[in-house]
Image (cartoon, rainbow, N blue to C red):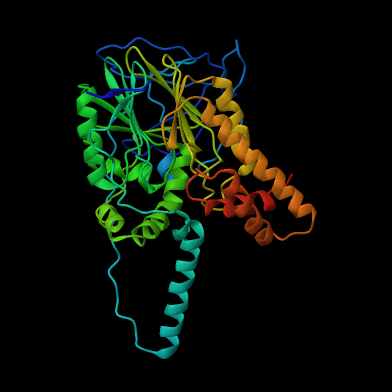
Amino acid sequence: MPQQFGREARTQPRRETQRQPRKGVVQVHSAANPIAESLPLSSDHPIRMVIVSEQRERGPLWNHPRQSVTDESSWVYTPRGIRDPIQEITAPAGEKIMISLLQSRRLAATSMLSVFVILLVSAVAAHTQETAPLGHNQTQPPPFVQANKTIKVSDHVYAIPDGRVNLVPNIGIVVGTRATLVVDAGMGSRNGQTVLRELAKVSKNADLYFTTTHFHPEHVTGVQAFPANTKIIRSEAQEEELKQKQPEFMRNFSNRTPEIKALLQDVKPRPPDILFDRELKLDLGGVTARLFLVGPGHTRGDTAIYVEEDKVLFTGDVVANRFFPIFPDKDASGKNWLAILSRFEALQPRAVVPGHGEVGDAGLITAQESYLKALRSRTAELKAQGKSSKEAAQLLTAEFQMKYPNWDNPGWIADAVEHFYSEPD
């Protein structure tokens, strides 16, 4: 048995399109000023997704620019018979994407072409290294999801803790009377299978939903092992970022250790069944999960999941417990990261499941915020003194490693400094 662990965005007008929808994907957009309400379950619609746009009683909580998606895989589909102000949908299962590989051709053995190929490979490797530096994680045991370690966080929420192993996320399970939502799934099929075995211990529901806090491989690719009828939910922004960056991150991760390469070698993309623009409300039966697009912070597509009845917040990597926060590439935003943390605090969660590190309470949000504010302030001071970004990064890495001696992966301090150094005030 598991161990016991002891509002909203302003709406934009609905987007219109002349294109035809891609089969197997339901994409939902906010109607003008609907009030979010939970809908009762029925045999015809075992799960209801309700778009959350604006709650008049409290006013907007998530207020950021709408992400624009132009990729053809994100064409809009609005089922017939749905009426505003509340949209009610049942998503069909998505199609698998078949990716054909290009056949390789033998290159002519000329010295000039050989030099070009070497330079090209070096440039790609350098770019990948910049995106996710290999040396920032202090230790690298095999990133396996733990079996038989699931904890009960609240009445409806369970978590599979990461065990403080790099590249293993905290995995969430939200259990309703009719369906279950899994949040993140570890890296590759092996870890996904472990998640499914742990899931079977706490839920017998046939209806399964899956969502991710962001696109990184250790959060997304475990869904490879999930059954075909699993409904995958993702924000437009996260889906766009996944398509743009996932191949590069997969190559980078695979080059780290033989174990990681083995975990990722057979991974194939699984497209979402449901896309949402800013917020989505999922009634699982007796418990409601609200999905919020909050990025850019750690990534452009950062998504938080808030279990309303239990007041449990899944933060993704926007919050970590005793790990230095990661700024993985140029799209990370220190300024908006701090704004996200303020909004998390406004939810007043009773329990916080961070992306990495032990489950805790709202104090985890405060600790992350204090660190980032202090680092931003010191970066500004050194910049005003004429220090370069590299000089500031070197000085502040030593300084903050002393201030936070029990936090892991201090190599990421320098990346945060360089982001704050380059961001406008």
Up the image or down, 46 lies above or below 411; here it is above
- Quarter of the picture containing the N terminus is top left
Do we see residue 146 in this rendering? yes
Tell how many labels: 0
Residue shown at 24% from the left, 54% from the top: 266
**Looking at the image, which residue is at 68% across and 44% down?**
376
Q: In this view, does 139 lie above or below 101?
A: above
Can you give x and y, in whole percent of width and height, for residue 33 in the image?
57, 17
> In x, y percent, where is residue 276?
45, 31
The residue lying at 51 percent from left, 47 percent from top is 326
Locate residue 220: give its quadrant: top left
Q: Where is residue 59 in the image (x, y as percent from the top left)?
A: 62, 16
Viewer-proximal residue, 416 or 394? 394
Residue 206 location, x and y as percent?
A: 21, 24
Q: Can residue 62 be seen in this view?
A: no
Decide if residue 425 is on the left or right side of residue 320: right
Residue lying furthest bottom in this view? Answer: 111
Q: In this view, does 342 lie above or below 268?
A: above
Residue found at the very far right of the displayed protein: 385
Q: Would you say 340 lies left or right of 19 here?
A: right
Q: In the picture, residue 153 is in which quadrant?
A: top left
Quadrant containing the C terminus is top right
* Left-right relation of 98 to 11: left
The residue at the point 52 percent across, 25 percent down is 362
Front residue of 34/317: it is 317
